[in-house]
């Protein structure tokens, strides 16, 4: 009989998974399902097109529909770097092999379903290849940082919605990132977003189960990710930073897709505007801490940080 899969209990403080991340994941699921429904008639044709190199151009209203797949796919990209699906696949494999002997209640069926469906979804190598194509580090992060800087710099005290210079900088940054992403958002992107985000939803359901966490001797999902990540030299800080990048970046990229028809205009004084600026600021500050560890994210030509754009006004602590 296989030995029980028990790790020594830890003494770390308990940190529950961020409810905001779960809401973001649920919103991503809703977005990819709506996108899939709207483009069901065209999905086969888009898949057949595959990867096509197209020149970067300013996105059109039609392009904005393709960009809708980018936000949930980016969330999946950063959660991939945090090791969430890798952890889920390892746990499911241990369960299938009989190495987890503790009764897991209803989660046992969830894990079994996840394991049985492994051949129907993209493998880790396929996911990594897709992410590398869509979010090519040499291009994406430079443009994303520029957009997040332009968004957070819209904040002033009091807000100046009529600041023409800031609006021009924002328009140029949004147009540059949108135009860069459009040719990467067609083909497999919409299908992959649906496939991967669905897998993430399945994984978070059983990875948060108390009986499973007890079986591994950890307090929460973070402890489980740390246990697996530590075998690959990934620490707690890196895991949480990638999760934060995904959560905040999803807000910015969802706005980008929806803002194309309006010329990227938004009201900095509105509740939605302040939420957007807060997300952009949080993404930029997190990226400042992460970027040195992301392979291929060359900093040549990276604009200097604009500093702290009045973080207290958007409810964020000073860096």
Image (tube, rainbow, N blue to C red):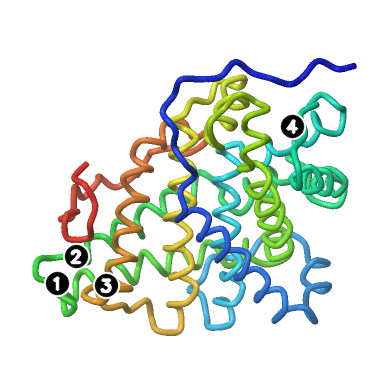
Residue 163 placement, left or right of 205: left
Image coordinates for residue 84, horizontal then vertical, percent: 62, 40
Residue picked out by circle 2: 155
Give the foreground label among 4 and 3: 4
Between 88 and 122, the one nearer to me in the picture: 88
- Rounded to the nearest angstrom, the CA distance separating label 2 from label 3 is 14 Å
Q: Looking at the image, which is closer to me, 44 or 32?
A: 32
Q: Gap in Å between the C-alphas at discs 1 and 2? A: 6 Å
- Asked if 292 appears above or below 192 in the picture, the reply is above
Alpha carbon separation for disc pair 4 and 2: 44 Å
Q: Regarding mark 2 in the picture, which secondary structure is present there?
A: loop
Q: CA distance from mark 1 to mark 4?
A: 49 Å
Residue 168: numbered disc: 3
Tell me the distance, in whole angstroms, between the alpha carbons under discs 1 and 3: 16 Å
Which image quarter: residue 207?
top right
Q: Point out the tag, 1 or 3, that comes first from the N-terminus.
A: 1
Of labels 1 and 4, earlier in sequence is: 4
Q: Which residue is mark 1?
A: 159
Name the residue tied to disc 4.
Answer: 90
């Amino acid at each position: 009989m296989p030995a029980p899969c028990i790790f020594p209990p830890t003494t770390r403080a308990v940190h529950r998974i961020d409810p905001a991340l779960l809401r973001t994941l649920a919103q991503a699921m809703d977005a990819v399902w709506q996108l899939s429904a709207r483009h069901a008639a065209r999905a086969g044709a888009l898949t057949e097109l595959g990867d096509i190199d197209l020149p970067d151009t300013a996105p059109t209203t039609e392009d904005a529909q393709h960009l809708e797949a980018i936000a949930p796919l980016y969330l999946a990209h950063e959660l991939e770097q945090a090791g969430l699906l890798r952890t889920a696949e390892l746990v499911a494999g241990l369960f299938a092999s009989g190495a987890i002997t503790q009764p897991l209640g209803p989660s046992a069926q969830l894990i079994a379903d996840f394991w049985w469906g492994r051949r129907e979804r993209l493998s880790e190598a396929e996911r990594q290849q897709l992410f590398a194509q869509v979010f090519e580090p040499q291009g994406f992060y430079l443009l994303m940082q520029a957009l997040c800087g332009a968004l957070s710099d819209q904040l002033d005290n009091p807000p100046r919605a009529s600041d023409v210079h800031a609006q021009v900088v924002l328009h140029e940054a949004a147009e540059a990132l949108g135009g860069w992403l459009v040719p990467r958002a067609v083909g497999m992107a919409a299908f992959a977003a649906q496939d991967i985000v669905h897998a993430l939803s399945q994984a978070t359901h059983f990875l948060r189960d108390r009986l499973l966490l007890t079986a591994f001797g950890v307090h929460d999902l973070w402890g489980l990710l740390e246990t697996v990540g530590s075998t690959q030299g990934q620490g707690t800080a890196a895991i949480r930073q990638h999760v934060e990048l995904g959560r905040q970046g999803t807000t910015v990229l969802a706005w980008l897709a929806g803002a194309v028809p309006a010329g990227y205009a938004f009201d900095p004084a509105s509740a939605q505007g302040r939420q957007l600026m807060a997300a952009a600021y949080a993404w930029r500050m997190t990226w400042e801490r992460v970027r040195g560890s992301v392979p291929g994210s060359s900093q040549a030509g990276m604009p200097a940080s604009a500093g702290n754009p009045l973080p207290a006004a958007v409810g964020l602590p000073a860096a």
